[in-house]
Structure formats: C-alpha cells, structure tokens
Amino acid sequence: MLNQNQTPLLDALKANAARPHAPFYTPGHKQGKGISQPLVDLFGKAVFRADLTELADLDNLFAPQGVIQEAQQLAAEAFGASQTWFLVNGSTCGIEAAILATCGTGDKIILPRNVHSSAIAGLILSGAIPIFLNPEYDPVLDIAHSITPSAVESALQQHPDAKAVLTVYPTYYGVCGDLNAIANITHQYNIPLLVDEAHGAHFAFHPELPTPALAAGADLTVQSIHKVLGAMTQASMLHIQGNRIDCDRISKALQLVQSTSPSYLLLASLDAARQQMALYGKMLMSRTLQLADEARTKISQIPGLSILEIPSPAYKGGFVALDKTRLTVTVSGLGLTGFEADEILDEKFAVTAEFASLQHLTLIISLGNTPADIEQLVQGFITIAKEYRRTNLNVKSHLWQDFVSTLSPALHFSPREAFFAVSEILPLIQTSDRICAEIVCPYPPGIPVLMPGEIITKPVLDYLQQIQAMGGFISGSADTSLKTLKVVK
C-alpha cells in the first residue's frame, strides 16, 4: 500500500516555485514577472510562480522517472488500476490514444453511435473502421442510453476480427449500461474493452455510486478528473489493467496527441485531486449524494417536472444503474423546451445547468456544490413552474429516434478517408444524399450527428436545424451557423 497522504508532484512544484533563482527557460513570463497586470489582478501572483516547465526536479510527462511517476502510481492505486497516465489535453486525447493503441488502418472497432466526438477523431487519426451500434432508446423521454450486451455480442459474431470494443459509461445523463456483461462478452474474443468514463471518475469512492469501469472488467478507461472531482479543467487520467493492451503503445500514442509543453498546474491538480479523494472521497461523496437526493426529492414534487430515474423493470442492459449525482429534469411538462428553461434559470435566477436538450435540463452535482446551491436551484424551478408555464410544447418529441432510424447501415468511406478527401462547401439544402466531410454535433454534449464518411439525410438536417432553432449550438462544422456543410467532392 502506498501512502496516499503524499502529493509528490504538488510538493515538487511548490518547492520549485519558491526557490530563488534567475530563470533562463520557458515560459517567457518568468514566474509571473512578465505577466500583464490584468492577469495578475485576476489570478494573483502565486499561480504564475508555479507555472513552470520540465525542470530537473519536476520530471518529464513522456518519460516519467521521478515525481510524475510517483504521482501516477499513487493515482493507479487510488482508482484501482495497474497503471495510470496523467492527461493534460483532457479525456479527448485519452480516447484518441486508446483507439490509436489498439487499432490500425482498416481495423474494426465496435462502438456506440452516440459516442463522443473524440472517438471520431480517434477513428480519423488511426484509420480504424467503426462498427456502430445504436444505443438503447427511451421513446418517452427521447434519450439514448447505453449499448446492450446482446448488441455487442451480435456485432462480435458478425465481426469476429474486431480489434476492440469501446463504450460510454456513464452517458452524459448519468446512465450506466451492463458493463460487466459487455466486458465478459468482449473478453471471450480476447480483445480489450475501452471505456469512455469521462463522467464517472467519482464512482470508485462510494458504494452507492455505480460500479467503476475497471471493477466491472474494463481493460482501459479514461476519466475527466476535472468534470466531477477537484482537478483543473482539462486535467484527466487514463487507466489500464490486465495484459490485453500494450502499455508502450499507450505511451507512444499519448505522445502523438498530448502537448510537449504540459502544464504543471494541471498535472499538480491531478496529484492533489487524487489525494483528496483517496483520503476523504467517501465523506465527500456522501455529502454530494445527500445534496443530490435533496434536489431530486424537492424538484420531483414540483408540478410539471419529473426526474430521470432507473426504469422498472430495467432496460435490457442499456440502463442498469444511474449516477444519482447527475440530475436530469424533464421540463416539457411545463410547455417549455430545455433550452428555454436553461435560459430562464441562468438569466433570472443565476443558476447555470451543465447542458440543455429539447425536453430536459441536466445538472452536475459535485463535491463543490453547497446546500445554498441546491436551495437556489429548487427555488428557481418552483418559480419557473408558477410563472413561466405554458399550455403545450410545440416541438417534435422524438427527434433523436427519427434521425437515428435514417442513418446509413455502413459508412460510405472510412472517417479518415472522408476527412482527407477532396471536399467542397455547399448550401445546406443541397447536401442531402451527399457524403459528409466534417464532424457536426450539437454541443454540449458533443455527440456527433454527422461525421466524415456518412451519407447526409434530410431527417438529419431537419434534426440539426430544429436543435439550432430551439437554442442549441452546433459545433465541429466549419460553418457554425449551419448555412453550409462540407461534403466530399
């Protein structure tokens, strides 16, 4: 057992920040002495004294032998991994590296259609061929859940030469599929299970939370420590266990997608966040769950509102557990879209949600929230239900299902081929039945609706336009106004 009280990387950074010396190395501001005054006024001086480069005492992220290696070993033990890598380019680079380390050009990888855009980037970089599975769908709430074990088994029977399976656990809504069963099926083919666990870094620290991906049998998982724990934005971790994945390939892949000038502020925040959870995680998560339960109870009692809960009986493996710290509120019963409710909460009550969709608002309750936050949220919803309610909601309720049902069963080109193909930009109305050459997704949550290599269909275009009309933001495409799209020429 390692001493989880230690913070080797944080301690080394603190010592080097305080050491008097004449700096003749990057960054150019030289521990804040060259920083503009407005930045000093906003952040103070201490943060810039600690904004250091790869000095001898601070180790090297790509060849760690000192304090970074020690910090990563502590993190591996705390999160239940055999080896952990610190990430400074977010979970995005971890997902990309996972695909690069397990798949080459032409190799097949099985993954859900509602995967994050980082996985599509991994397909483009690696040249892998996606075998997409549609996730289980809730037609009442118009929410996609997880892929099911039976869908994975069927895909592997059809594609026994697949090199890996990738799944999302939990979804942006906090929904967890039957990962244990998916792991067992995947391992029957002796291939690795890769998990996008960006929103589940806290699972290992409380028994009332869903089973962590590694404990459920995943070979590799990527976690955004900044999303739900106490690290700085962009700070994430990649964990592996077992021998199905080559550790050296992970290290080499990460060198391709991470900065060669990593921020030690981000790295140190990972060290500190690990220590915080290793020492106090259960207490912090107990308090967080208590706040979440209070919010769920009070909001579910407001007329016109409902809360996403585990269905009974559970779906067939697509929804077997729910992260109770993720709160999805259905507001369509008030005659409002999620986008409208989001805007009202933000502008009138200073309450800002994680993201909005047509019928819902989704909120993250974490160790940083307070009882006052919960009270402010509840009071905001109470007032909205009284003062902003309308008689009906004039939007189509099954948009996600409608556009998924029209997707091509296979890509016309691989994502990599389409991304690098000669392309042209056309008015949106002229792109139906053409091959898409860019990633297009409403953000958040960053789940692609179109990706390079897919045939563009009219229902998909209608879906994007309605999302945009309701207040959603379209990202990934060159033209964020969505008046034009890039297609293969």
Image (cartoon, rainbow, N blue to C red):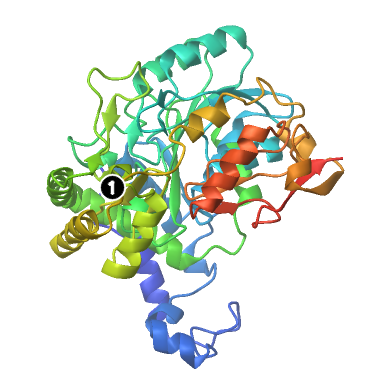
Q: Is residue 261 left or right of residue 362?
A: right
Determine the image quadrant of residue 271: bottom left
Which residue is found at the position 73% from the left and 25% from the top? Answer: 106
Tell me the residue at 79%/42% (across/down): 430
* Residue under the point 45% across and 23% down: 147
Q: Nearer the viewer, residue 193 or 119?
A: 119
**Relative image position of residue 395 (x, y in whole percent):** 45, 42
Residue drawn at point x = 19 percent, y = 63 percent: 376
Q: Hey, what amino acid is under mark 1? A: Leu
Judge the density around disc 1: few (<14), some (14-19), many (≥20) Cα neighbours within 10 Å: many
Identify the residue at the far top of this view: 157
Q: How many marks?
A: 1
Q: The C terminus lies in which quarter of the figure?
A: top right
SS state under label 1: helix
Residue 8 is situated, as x and y percent measured from the top left of the image, at 35, 60
Q: For residue 98, say whether it is visible.
A: yes
**Res. 235 image quadrant:** bottom left
Q: Which residue is identified by label 1?
A: 334
User: How far from the left and from the top, in percent, is residue 171?
Assistant: 40, 37
- Which image quarter is the N terminus in? top left
- 184 relative to 420, above or below: above
Q: Position of residue 263 (x, y in %)?
A: 51, 65
Of residues 226 and 311, the one nearer the viewer is 311
